[in-house]
Image: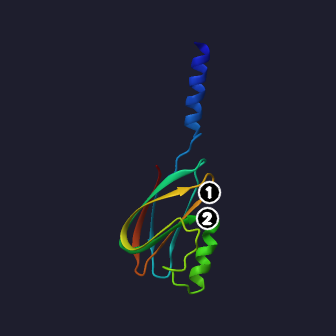
Amino acid sequence: MRTLSRVLFLLVCLQLVGCGSKVHDDLNGEVSALQDLVYHVDGPKKAQKIRIVVAADENVNVFVLLKKDFSDIISATLTGANVKTKLPETMLSKSFDAKTYDLQVDVPAKEELTIVIASKKPTKVNVKVDSQ
């Protein structure tokens, strides 16, 4: 009986420490025509499906990728590429011209996630990121 109670205590402690950590962020910001909004979200300890919900006052474009691939999207936009057709192959998700988005992406273990939000007009944005 003592052994069982010790094992249960150990399992509870590991759960409290975050052994199987979940991703949860609630982010707010503003986008202008000249300044994209970029969020870097800590990656999960194990591969997980992540849900990203974006709400904005004006239409926005949303790009989701791994942080290690972030320079690819910068290169695509700085070289004048048509953003809708010339995005990097490594993009996890992309959506264009809407006020709300509900996206799901698979994120590998220990990989930081990057969310880029762009708009032609100034707008307030709320982003919620949760493990599924």
Q: Which mark is residue 100?
A: none
Q: Are marks 1 and 2 in contact (CB under 8 Å)?
A: yes
Looking at the picture, tell me which residue is in the foreground, 73 or 128: 73
Query: To which residue does mark 2 refer?
Result: 67
Q: Is residue 96 above or below residue 114?
A: below
Q: Is residue 98 left or right of residue 113?
A: left
**Picture mark count:** 2
Instruction: Point out residue 95 in the picture as x, y percentages from the top left corner.
Output: 44, 71
**Which of the 4 image quarters holds residue 61?**
bottom left
For residue 123, above or below residue 54? below
Q: Position of residue 99 (x, y in %)?
A: 35, 70
| Residue found at the far top of this picture | 1
Q: Residue at x 41, y 78 (%)?
A: 122
Q: Quadrant of the N terminus?
A: top right
Question: Gap in Å between the C-alphas at discs 1 and 2?
Answer: 7 Å
Image location of residue 80, percent across then percent down: 56, 87
What residue is shown with label 1?
111
